[in-house]
Amino acid sequence: MTPLAEILRETIRAGGPMPFPSYMGMALYHSEHGYYARGPQRIGRAGDFYTSASVGAVFGELMGGQFCAVWEAMGKPASFSIVERGANDGAFARDALTWAASARPDFFAAVTYLIDEPLATVKAAQERTLESFGDRVRWGLAGPARGVFFANELLDAIPFRRVRFTSGGWKELSVAVEGDGFVWVETELLDGATKSRLEEIVKIHPDFPEGYETEIAPAVASEVRLAASAISEGVMFFVDYGHPASDYYHPARRTGTLRCYRGHTAHENPFEAPGETDITAHVEFSLAAAAAISSGCELLGFCDQGHFLTGAAAETLRRMDGKPASLAKAKWLRQFQTLTHPAHMGRSFHVLAASKGNVGGAVLSGFHYARAAPGGATEVLGL
Ligand SMILES: C[S@@+](CC[C@H](N)C(=O)[O-])C[C@H]1O[C@@H](n2cnc3c(N)ncnc32)[C@H](O)[C@@H]1O
């Protein structure tokens, strides 16, 4: 039994069934034993799972190009912030800044990179990674900034609620102790935001089968609103795996999207080794986009990562075309393929971008190949 399992067991014994967001919050962020609080070495080859940022420098390079396009559309202000939350070991920041310094020194000269990091161990790792950038990188936010907000795989790590459709209506699944382990127990729905989201979801799909289980994450909406408050003018980017509401809550998806990762193996039991296992669920992008709009933002686009990065890379690919084969070119293309191929990270990951204030009609090359449904992103997201 992990040290955190012991703590969770005692807490539940004393207080009764624990709402799942509290269980997940402790499992991931407990100050001493939480999965993420123990340090950033969980991501990448030696860890439990890959993220786009851990695949290599190409992701930071291509997103950096999109940030630069926002800067240009805003009239190249002398001071431009890139705000990142969920920066892990700082690899994405390093890759985006390294690209800017060499490809667009005029943009680099304007940039301050701000990281919002609550975990001390993780911040220490970021400081090591980003040391060479000096005070170009800072920690903490000193009020709303002009520029971009960026988060990769932040929203999937925000504690969510788990619900089940029964003959008696929707029930919440909380965590109880049984023997040495934990079990799910049904309770009434525990918060108003979950109840109202379920009422909206039932309008999209009125025919859930009994026993249908899924996740609801009102805290994702709060996280998006917090991100919107971090910028006064600019663009927010959220990259994550997830779906619009109509797919997310499709009646055929009977067991939801809760997944756990340990040693590059996925399973669906969040009660196994809490503190040593990542717990996550896909992101409901319709909820995230609606929260952005209700925070005064305008939707710029939504599409899968494969199409987004292909649009973002078009210029680079054109320049590469016809250049002689080299190890560097092969490495770049290998990373690009991992990020964009539908069987790897290209289809399940999505990019949501929303603008705030006057961004000069920013048109991002990333959305060039986005599905051109009438109404675009708004229609795809069912908003
Ligand atoms: C799945 S990891 C992704 C890390 C990194 N962005 C990457 O792509 O490799 C999720 C990260 O979000 C962080 N996180 C979760 N909630 C946060 C919050 N409220 N503020 C800042 N970071 C948060 C976690 O500590 C963790 O580092």
Image: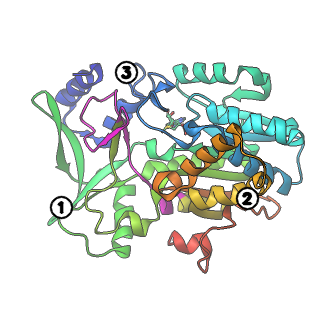
Contact check, label 1 and label 3, Cβ < 8 Å = no
Tag shown at residue 211: 1
Mark 1 Cα within 10 Å, few/some/many (few <14, many 20+)?
some
The stretch drawn in magenta includes residue 76: no
Q: Which amino acid does label 1 sit on?
A: Gly
283 or 186, which lies in front?
283
Residue at horizontal 13%, vertical 27%?
180
Residue 327 percent coordinates (x, y): 68, 37
Q: What element carries label 3?
A: loop
Compared with 51, 165 (above or below) is: below
Q: Measure how far apart labels 1 and 2 are at the Cα level.
A: 46 Å
Q: Does the residue labelled 2 lie within 8 Å of ligand 1?
A: no
12 or 361, which lies in front?
361
Residue annotated with mark 3:
33
Q: What element carries label 2?
A: helix
* Snapshot colouring: rainbow
Tag shown at residue 118: none
The magenta segment is 262-288
Tag shown at residue 314: 2
Compared with 290, 5 (above or below) is: above
Residue 107 percent coordinates (x, y): 85, 42
